[in-house]
Image (cartoon, rainbow, N blue to C red):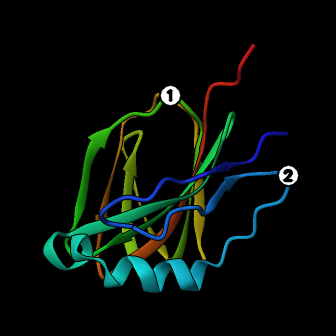
Amino acid sequence: MEEKFNEATQQRPEGDRAMDATLVTIDLPLFIKRIKQESTWKDSDRNAVTVFKTNGMRLVLVALHAGAELKTHTVDGIISVQVIDGKMKFNADNRSVELNTGQMLALHKGIPHSVLAIEETIFLLTLTTTLEK
């Protein structure tokens, strides 16, 4: 398997972090600390970092300030949302659920959904992606 690494950016100059390999370890507390130190977190209502990306799956750590909203959208894969810390309202399929620390949900692809952070919230988004044929 070919290992893949992120590239350095102005936002994340350290670069060279494993994004895809036979084994990738992910230190969520360290990533949370880092994204809360970045200017994007300080200057907007959210920040996120992709912590794993391979053909078939992507893991994204998302941080939302209280009141931040991800407006109604759809995705082309199945998702799971796991709240690491905080409280959010997740709307989909004419239903609304509150998710607190330690709770999660799963949603099939193509279903319109939105998210509202009731308080500062950190969640891990898992998204299935298209597999190569």
Which residue does the image show at 52% across and 77% down from the upper left? 31
Which residue does the image show at 65% across and 78% down from the upper left? 27
The amino acid at mark 2 is Thr
Pointer 2 and pointer 1: residues touching (CB < 8 Å)? no
Q: CA distance from mark 2 to mark 1?
A: 25 Å
Q: Is residue 75 above or below residue 88?
A: above
Q: In the rendered image, which quarter contains the C terminus?
A: top right
Examine the image and state in which quarter residue 45 appears. bottom left
Q: Furthest-top residue in view?
A: 133
Q: Is disc 2 surrounded by few (<14), some (14 to 19) or many (20+) residues within 10 Å?
A: few
Q: Disc 2 marks which residue?
A: 22
- Give coordinates of residue 85: x percent, y percent: 48, 83
- Horizontal arrangement in the rendering, residue 80 relative to residue 67 (left or right): right
Of circles 2 and 1, the one toward us is: 2
**Picture disc at residue 68:** none
Mark 1, secondary structure of its residue: loop
Q: Disc 1 marks which residue?
A: 76
Q: Earlier in the sequence, mark 2 or mark 1?
A: 2
- Horizontal arrangement in the rendering, residue 64 relative to residue 67 (left or right): right
Q: Is disc 1 surrounded by few (<14), some (14 to 19) or many (20+) residues within 10 Å?
A: few
The amino acid at mark 1 is Asp
Q: Is residue 59 above or below residue 87?
A: above
Q: Is residue 20 above or below residue 86?
A: above
- Horizontal arrangement in the rendering, residue 107 relative to residue 131 (left or right): left
Examine the image and state in which quarter residue 57 appears. top right
